[in-house]
Image (cartoon, rainbow, N blue to C red):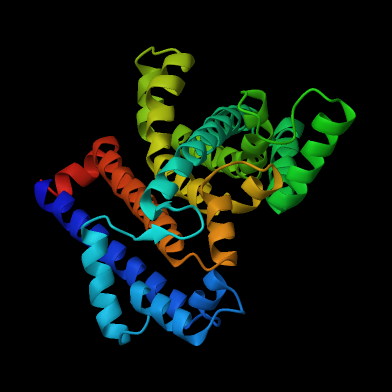
Amino acid sequence: MTAYLGRRLAQALLQIWGAITIVFVALRVLPGDPAELILGSQATPEALEELRGSLGLDQPLLVQYAAHMGDVVALDFGHSWRQNVSALDACLERLGPTLSLSAWAMVITIVLGFAAGSFAARRANTWADHLVSVSSLVGQALPPFWIGIMLSLIFARWLQVLPSTADGTLGSLLLPAFTLALPFVGWLGRLVRTGILEEMNQDYVRTAHAKGMSHRVVFYIHVLRNTLVPVVTMLGLLMGYFIANGVIVEVIFAWPGIGSLLIDSITFRDYAVVQAVLTVITVCYILLNLLVDVLYVYLDPRIQLENA
């Protein structure tokens, strides 16, 4: 068990290093001069050179990379010239709203997805099952930006029951959370339905019924637990997706999260903040995957035996 977790931790650290390196190279090859964007096109050559020197942009690429990795280890991503604060502080300040939005989207996905999957599985091959399948496919096909616009139009403009932009209330969280969650509710429902139907045909279910266990006990205590093994893996990836790819939703609803900060920083070539945001997103995604692997070990006894 310890060896397995050690290998996964080493892989996670290697992935984080690779992601930080890719971000560093990508930002350096983008067209445009950050010094000119900061000082403006009317800046003198002397001022531009001085700023490039203070930012370390006049150094060879390998020297810049070595200095950058040293700063990352020390959790120093530099200073945001736009916000006049530490780049990491600017990132962490926006991380809270993004995590809150992602958590609510995950709750909505789990509740509606498990309800739809269980409902369809217990009524397999009926009109209700077919309705859930068709609805899930339609939900997965709709792009998030269209869902966000439609929800905002219906609930914010026509019905006027929910705000369309962030105002610090719980109501302002519902529309962006549902926009993130809806494309994956049907996907999770189909996954749960398939898992339940596969488990219901296993020998241990027939044995449990033969011993006199009620259908409810067998379903909720045994079948659903075994269904969780593949579902938990996908939920971990889904949480990482919500954190990393909620940019469009945050822009549509003016949500003050890390995604909208990333868009603004890329637009103005605020290198320090872009690197901090992408690094934090990468670390969150990889650590979530690591957490899923740990949970997977405890949920699936077969892995415990393989790594004993």
User: Residue 160 in the image: x percent, y percent?
Assistant: 84, 25
* 41 or 292, nearer to the observer: 41
Q: Quadrant of residue 62?
A: bottom left
Foreground residue, 251 or 149?
251
> Observer-nearest residue: 245 or 251?
251
Looking at the image, residue 223 sits to the left or right of residue 298; the answer is right
Q: Is residue 102 left or right of residue 230?
A: right
Residue 217 image position (x, y, % from top left): 42, 15
Say above or below: 291 vs 15.
above
Q: Residue at x 62, y 46 (%)?
A: 250
Q: Is residue 202 visible?
A: no
The quarter in which the C terminus is drawn is: top left
Above or below: residue 133 compared with residue 43: above
In this view, the residue farthest toward the right is 158
Image quadrant where one finds the N terminus: top left
Residue 152 visible from this viewpoint: yes
Residue 82 percent location from the top left of the image: 51, 58
- Left or right: 167 with respect to 308? right
Instruction: Determine which quarter of the picture holds residue 96.
Output: top left
Tell me which residue sits at (34%, 15%) in the image. 211
**Residue 175 drawn at (x, y percent):** 69, 34
Total labels drawn: 0
> Residue at the spot x=61%, y=79% of the render?
42
User: Residue 118 versus residue 297: which sits nearer the camera?
Assistant: 297
Q: Is residue 70 above or below residue 127?
A: below
Please identify the quarter of the rendering in which residue 54 is found. bottom left
